[in-house]
Image: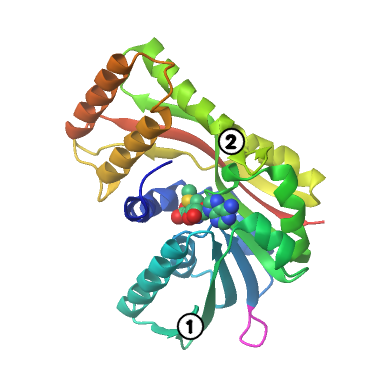
Amino acid sequence: MRLDEQAFIEYLEVKKSIDDRSLNCAVWKTLVTAMPPATCEQPWQILEIGAGIGTMVRRLIEWDFLRYADYTALDACATFLEEGRRRLSNWARAMGLEALSEGQRLRISDRSRDIRINFVDAELSRWLKEAAPQERYDLLIAHAFLDLVNLEETLPGLMRCLKKDGLFYFTLNFDGLTLLEPPIEETLDEGILSFYHRTMEERRAGEKPSAGALSGRRLLRALERAGGTLLRAGASDWVVHSVEGQYPAGEERFLQFFLQMVEEALRGHNAIDPSRLEAWFGARRDQLQRGELSLIVHQLDCVGRRR
Ligand SMILES: C[S@@+](CC[C@H](N)C(=O)[O-])C[C@H]1O[C@@H](n2cnc3c(N)ncnc32)[C@H](O)[C@@H]1O
């Protein structure tokens, strides 16, 4: 994934509406039911890791889930967090909410909510070793993130940040299937996409392998060993397609970014003849321009509790 920071910010923004409709409803309802009530005196303590530009905070307010909360949004990229703070505060004001910036914090409030967001610029494994509070959080969120870390190394430390019985909500965990429709040449389609998955499998998290292309199923296996109990899991596949030849707002751009990320992942590997590869990407972009290209990506969500 080598989009530059500005392009990646735009990618995260256009991804939001696709994620909104992809998140698994049964998993979401399990989370909503399992959370204890939040009050002004006892706000939820929430940690989100790999928070990017803060689209999850926005979603949780839009879905009327967040009312009273101290929300820590952690990411290794200061530019994303800064952009997140700016976007969230503009969005909140446009929604008629009050938005107050206080240093690294943003407070979003109105008569029935008070949400204090603390943006923490930190690399996760280092933060877990050096700064993470123990048994502090009621809820831990990771959205489109856990494929990047080594699960065995990271999950136990994350679980220790949760209060006993605290909940985790791990969403959009890629699980090994990418389909582009309609086919161009089946064996070439399959070769390119399985090579793309291989580049994810080769990705390292420090010295160790990352959860990679099968992060969804690996996560389900790793949870129990890390001290978690699964309450509900389900699919959160992306299904992106045009409607009567037109892509809904932003989704054409999302598909352009997606093709670019696959192309960049494959660049420099000589597994596939470069001229065939170039022709294949050209044909995919032509399909996109004609409104014919669809994308299906299999992902898993899960919610559970610290044992
Ligand atoms: C695929 S993006 C997802 C962002 C956000 N959750 C969303 O879906 O909009 C992954 C995010 O994780 C952050 N990240 C990657 N590795 C990290 C690490 N080791 N520690 C902290 N953040 C990291 C990146 O900067 C990026 O913002």
Residue lying at 43% horizontally and 62% vertically, measured from the top left: 80
- Residue 120 position, x and y percent, is 56, 69
Residue 184 visible? The answer is: no
Residue in front for this viewpoint, 26 or 219: 219
Label 2 CA crowd tier, 10 Å (few <14, some 14–19, many 20+): many
Q: Tell me which segment is drawn in magenta.
A: 38-43
- Residue 26 position, x and y percent, is 58, 50
Residue picked out by circle 2: 212
Asked if 110 appears above or below 70 in the picture, the reply is below
Residue in front for this viewpoint, 209 or 46: 209
- Tell me the quadrant of the picture where the N terminus can be found: top left
SS of the residue at dot 2? helix
SS of the residue at dot 1? loop
Task: Please give the count of numbered marks on the rendered protein.
Answer: 2
Q: Amino acid at mark 2?
A: Gly
Residue picked out by circle 1: 103
Residue lying at 60% horizontally and 38% vertically, measured from the top left: 204
Can residue 42 be found in the magenta stretch?
yes
Label 1 CA crowd tier, 10 Å (few <14, some 14–19, many 20+): few
Residue in front for this viewpoint, 92 or 263: 263
Can residue 267 be found in the magenta stretch?
no
- The residue mark sitting in front, 1 or 2, is 1
Instruction: Write down the quadrant of residue 40 in the picture.
Output: bottom right
Task: Judge left or right: residue 222 versus residue 63.
Answer: right
Asked if 224 appears above or below 135 in the picture, the reply is above
Q: Amino acid at mark 1?
A: Gly
How far apart are the two marked residues, 1 and 2, measured between alpha carbons?
Answer: 36 Å
- Residue 122 position, x and y percent, is 58, 63
